[in-house]
Image: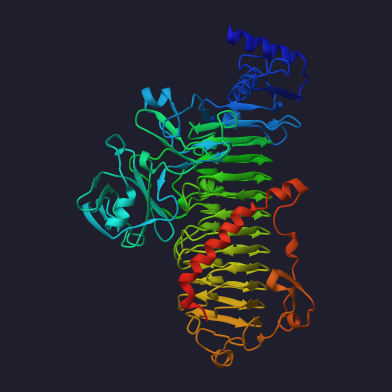
Amino acid sequence: MKKQKILLSFLFIISCLVLNAQVKIYVSPTGDDGNNGTKKEPLASLTGARDFIRNYKQSQNYQESFIVIIQDGFYKMTSPLYLSSEDSGTLNNPIIYKAEKGAKPIFSGGKKITGFKVNDDGLWETSIFESAYYKWRFNQLYVNNKRATLARTPNKGFLKIEAVQQNIWEQGSGKQPEKAQQVLIFDKENFDLIGVVNEDEKDLIRFKAYHKWDLTIRNIDKIEDDSLAIYTSGKGMKPWNKLKKGGRIIFENYKNALDEDGEWFLNSKGTLFYKPLPGQTFENTEIIAPVLESLIVAVGDIENNKYVYHIKFEGLSFKHCAYNLPPTGFEPNQAAALLNASIKLEAGKNINFINCEVSNVGQHAIWFDKGCSNSVVEHCYIHDIGGGGVYLGAFKALSGKYHTSSIKINNNIIQTGGQEFAPAVGVWVGHSSDNEITHNDIGNFYYTGISVGWVWGYKPSLAKNNTIAYNKIHHIGWDLLSDMAGVYTLGKSEGTVIKNNIVHNIHAYSYGGWGLYADEGSSGITMENNLVYSTKTGGFQQHYGENNVVKNNIFAFAKLYQAQCVLAEDHHSFDFFSNIVIFDQGYVLKGAWDTVDASMDKNIYWNVKYEKYNFNNNSFKEWQQLGHDQHSFIINPAFKDASNFDFRFKTKMAIHKIDFKPFDYKEVGVYGNKKWLSKSVLPTEISKAFDKVVEKNMLGNFHLKR
């Protein structure tokens, strides 16, 4: 009967159409996928609309343009929307999945949790049938559209590891052992803070240990009270990011840790506990657990040149996508690059996301993986994400039809990421070229705002000709990870331009917290017309690289050093000219400046508080005698109010001396109506918390100030 009804629906629609007409298909939360797709008899899901289009195209000998009009409401997704080459549109006849005018449809991969009661401890609790009988578990929980905290110890800050022993079981051929056991030993004070772990929770409890630029998440094999030791096993430790004495660690996912408002825990018997926030009642609280691990998966057939073409999503919200931690845990990896994404595309061309939202997800939001090109993410609101925002390209240098290129990421708000996986970034560009990342607001991440390149050193890289322009990147790093930046680059990147960005409030746990960071092998990159201020360790840092150009930038108010470089090599490293460096504390330059092959000239340096200038332990005169900055000046650049971050010029007399060309930094960031602009402003409580973290962190660095 269902097939007959669909066939009759086709015949009905065909009778109403002429050749090359536009087919409108309606979807409603009260619809039915057996309906005919009209406004009176709408379908119920994206998958239903996809199947309708598939069947329609198979029944016709001509190509139509399809618009799937999605009505307002909440759509519970029972499976991801899978798209293949047969679901493609064409250049003249695309397939569009679009919100009805005025509608804000939400597609959820989660399950609403109900049936709570208050137990004797004042906690909300409910038994979840699927968890009790089918062992369904979830690692995230969303309460009133916000991520709740999985029960953890300590609630703030970290425990400290006293010592680590590693027993290698299988070395393998790499530097990192294939299999090993680690024994984490604590002093009594830290060990006692873990508290009691019930017998039926020992398979659930796990730890997160934070390294320089990544983290380890592991389940626990054994807790040994007598020796104050925790046993875990899996991969061996990476030599460059070990578990070590003094390392920061938290424990989570056990009942005894459920002691703060807003925390939750799901026990092994399928009972969910939640400690409500003040003012929350059963009536005013919605609790959703994510079920699906993907929301959209579009995969073409690269080998046979069958791509997914010409599909647009417009005005849709995608929420509640799960990341389920495997039994092996999560091994350290930079930029959390081994995570999945809620929306994953492979071999897709002209796939566009316009005015969409992705939030409340456990992993990355959107990933254009191998073989993608000529696609757009524009005016999208990506926030509260467990991983990163938008990822482009693959880990390996895949050329030809496997290469990802020409993706435009424009006018998006990408904020509050890394909530589950701190190393994740706002926008990640792996082996991908000719992309435009422009006019985005990227804020409140723990590692890096934009990361470009995926080769350490001078091996072949395909991350070339990328444009990073007019982005506002801010409140990055906090005091959690190190060796990070607002904009971070790797490898040979000829033709890549980083220009007209504002980068500010960048901090790090220990070293790092740079504005613009040319890491290992970064080469052929131009950094110009950027305003960088309020960083920890410098507005600019180059580890090592070749033939980079740093010109016409404003670097202001770094706390320790204004600029750094690390390694001198047997080639020309970079040019640094026509820049303004203004500060009130710290070194001017620190690192290998005396030996690196760099051209530095026509710069302004200005200390707004003191007459002292430390150029890598040289005075300015001594610095010039070494052959640097022959036509540079210690002179007030005449900003209108630099102390309050107004970097417009009162007069241009000083900057004319160094051929500095003013740029309008008010054009930076997102653009559009007032509502869209206001959405990009971080809540005051976040920016204030960031400032407090910075102030506290800097107390441990007072001896470095000059």
How was the colour assigned to the protein in this rendering?
Answer: rainbow
Instruction: Judge left or right: residue 251 versus residue 693.
Output: left
Q: Note whether 38 is above or below 618 in the view shown.
A: above
Q: Position of residue 382 (x, y in %)?
A: 61, 45
In the rendered image, which quarter is residue 350 located in? top right
Q: Position of residue 402 (x, y in %)?
A: 51, 46
Is the N terminus in the top left, top right, bottom left or bottom right quadrant? top right
Residue 77 seen from this side: yes
Q: Which one is nearer the viewer's eye here, 128 or 459?
A: 128
Q: Which one is nearer the viewer's eye here, 363 or 416?
A: 416
Q: Position of residue 327 (x, y in %)?
A: 33, 39
Instruction: Judge left or right: residue 594 versus residue 248.
Output: right
Q: Note whether 214 is above or below 538 in the view shown.
A: above
Q: Residue at x 64, y 11 (%)?
A: 7
Q: Which one is nearer the viewer's eye here, 509 or 196?
A: 196
Q: Residue furthest top?
A: 1
Q: Which one is nearer the viewer's eye here, 575 or 633?
A: 633
Q: Position of residue 299 (x, y in %)?
A: 53, 36
Number of numbered discs overlaid on the protein picture: 0
Q: Note whether 256 is above or below 678 in the view shown.
A: above
Q: Note whether 137 is above or below 409 in the view shown.
A: above
In the rendered image, which quarter is residue 366 located in? top right
In the rendered image, which quarter is residue 486 located in? bottom right
Residue 495 seen from this side: no
Instruction: Judge left or right: residue 40 versus residue 259.
Output: right
Instruction: Judge left or right: residue 59 versus residue 216.
Output: right
